[in-house]
Amino acid sequence: MNLAYILHSATLDRFYIGYTSNFDVRLEFHLNSNETRKFTSKATDWEIYFKIECETKTQALAIEKHIKEMKSKIYIENLIRYPEITIKLLEKYKDC
């Protein structure tokens, strides 16, 4: 399953946006990575904030890129508040 996902750290009050085809393994990596160069190693309280199941890897990567390009906490919060945004994203990047 291909996912675009967002994690949130209350400690940092920051979001992390990513893509994966194996969410459980990827989340474990984020929570237990000791590599200090990795962004998610700056906190240990990452929680799943949002995820979008995609039909293809290309679609998931396009949605991840779109969310990152928005560079907006408000946009990320609106993904939860307004589910129709997710529907529009899946439609927009359907044929990627």
Image (cartoon, rainbow, N blue to C red):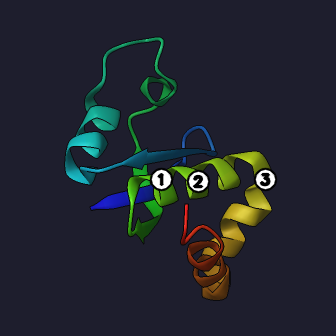
Residue at the spot 21% in from the left edge and 51% down from the top edge: 24
Q: Amino acid at mark 2?
A: Ala
Quarter-wise, where is residue 54 in the image? bottom left
Q: Earlier in the sequence, mark 1 or mark 3?
A: 1
- Residue 33, numbered circle: none
Q: Nearer the viewer, residue 56 or 12?
A: 56
Q: Is residue 66 above or below residue 94?
A: above
Quarter where residue 90 is shown: bottom right
Secondary structure type for disc 1? helix
Residue 13 position within the rendered picture, expressed as x and y whole percent measured from the top left: 63, 45
Residue under numbered circle 3 = 70
Q: Is residue 34 above or below residue 6?
A: above
Q: Is residue 9 visible?
A: yes
Residue at label 1?
58
The Cα–Cα distance between marks 1 and 2, rounded to whole angstroms, is: 6 Å
Task: In this rendered view, identify the residue nearer to me: 31 or 79.
Answer: 79
> Which residue is tagged 2?
62
User: Residue 86 is drawn in which quadrant?
Assistant: bottom right
